[in-house]
Image (spheres, rainbow, N blue to C red):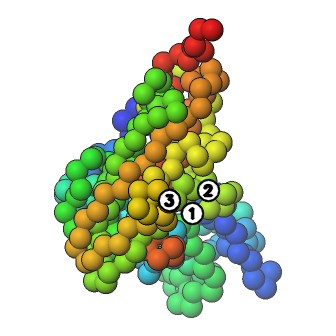
């Protein structure tokens, strides 16, 4: 479900996660959230994390932001866990009740933070509420059950390669707008820049990629450009947007790869080859160019290619 109004910074893909054990349970929602940051240094309460006490007794919950090593295709670990914070991190929930905790997204204004895709997790721990013999209540010291929600963050894009940050791979632009019309029907090329920010040389494989259901690359950012239509979706054919293969001896196509030493910058052309179609000219699509070191998901990045309706297609006159 998308929740985007005006210039608010959040675009949310909701999911659900539930873990049960020995008759007790912990339930949180959403289990995954995608936030597209439109403005840096904007401490705006975003998508709330809902805690649902499905137990017959009061429970105490503790929330903290966790940044693990690389585990999701296309996303790097969030550089600072303080950039994603719950407004409350310890609270009590009555039996069969719910509690919504707004999550604050605040990314510092820094040139190195453009064109980024980061991931962190919100860890929720549940423990029974214990009534003390004297005075108010207190939480049990032993935390019994836990669940995690995945928080994905994508920062503003521009065409300038940002300074080196903590990510092992930097690409620009992270989002490429494509206007449907004469310049993109059966022709068109744009270039992406790739910089190896790791300590080792890599061969990067580029491919046109259409995510499957449940893929880490989700939450289409198709409402970046206001439209009057709600028709959206992934591209129907990988050939519409694809890396341009280099040719051996100018004749035989080679792999769509590029080798870069640490700190080296390379460029790779991307072909736009949209079919002539009146229907396509009225809809909005998104394609993904996935960049993977040695073809592996760890340390990979992607470019979102947003196809927006443009000129009306008119078949050539016979």
Residue 292: x %, y % from top left: 46, 69
Task: Kindly identify the residue that appears in the image at 74 percent across and 77 percent down.
Answer: 20
The residue furthest top is 317
Q: Which of marks 3 and 2 is nearer the N terminus?
A: 2
Q: Disc 3 designates what residue?
A: 253
Q: Residue at x 57, y 56 (%)?
A: 209
Please give the residue where the numbered disc 2 appears in the rendered image.
Answer: 211
Q: In which quarter of the image is residue 267?
A: bottom left
**Residue identified by numbered label 1:** 216
Return the residue nearer the eye: 221 or 299.
299
Q: Earlier in the sequence, mark 2 or mark 1?
A: 2
Estimate the x, y position of residue 143 in percent, counting from the top left: 57, 86
Tell me whether the residue at label 3 lies in contact with that at label 1, contact meaning CB atoms closer than 8 angstroms: no
- Crowd class of label 3 (few under 14; some 14 to 19; many from 20; radius 10 Å): few
Q: Give the image location of residue 275, x and y in percent.
A: 59, 32
Tell me the distance, in whole angstroms, between the alpha carbons under discs 3 and 2: 26 Å
Residue 258 visible, this angle: yes
Image position, residue 104 (x, y; %): 38, 57
């Amino acid at each position: 479900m998308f929740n985007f109004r005006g210039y608010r910074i959040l675009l949310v893909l909701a999911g659900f996660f539930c873990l049960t054990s020995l008759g007790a349970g912990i339930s949180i929602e959403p289990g995954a959230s995608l936030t597209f940051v439109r403005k840096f240094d904007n401490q705006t309460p975003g998508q709330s994390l809902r805690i649902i006490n499905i137990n017959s007794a009061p429970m105490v919950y503790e929330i903290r932001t966790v940044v693990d090593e690389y585990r999701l295709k296309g996303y790097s670990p969030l550089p600072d866990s303080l950039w994603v914070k719950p407004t409350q991190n310890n609270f009590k929930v009555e039996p069969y009740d719910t509690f919504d905790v707004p999550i604050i997204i605040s990314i510092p204004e820094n040139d190195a933070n453009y064109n980024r895709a980061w991931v962190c997790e919100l860890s929720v721990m549940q423990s029974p509420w214990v009534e003390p013999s004297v005075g108010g209540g207190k939480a049990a010291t032993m935390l019994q059950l836990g669940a995690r929600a995945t928080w994905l963050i994508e920062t503003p894009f521009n065409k300038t390669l940002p300074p080196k940050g903590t990510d092992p791979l930097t690409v620009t632009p992270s989002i490429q707008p494509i206007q449907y019309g004469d310049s993109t029907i059966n022709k068109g090329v744009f270039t992406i820049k790739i910089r190896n920010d790791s300590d080792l040389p890599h061969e990067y494989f580029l491919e046109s990629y259409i995510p499957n259901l449940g893929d880490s690359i989700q939450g289409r950012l198709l409402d970046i450009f206001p439209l009057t239509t709600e028709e959206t979706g992934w591209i129907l054919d990988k050939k519409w947007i694809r890396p341009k293969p280099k040719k051996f001896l100018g004749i035989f196509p080679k792999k769509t790869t590029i080798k870069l030493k640490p700190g080296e910058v390379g460029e790779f052309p991307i072909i736009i080859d949209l079919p002539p179609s009146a229907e396509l000219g009225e809809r909005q699509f998104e394609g993904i160019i996935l960049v993977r070191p040695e073809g592996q998901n760890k340390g990979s990045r992607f470019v979102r290619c947003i196809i927006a309706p443009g000129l009306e297609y008119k078949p050539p006159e016979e």
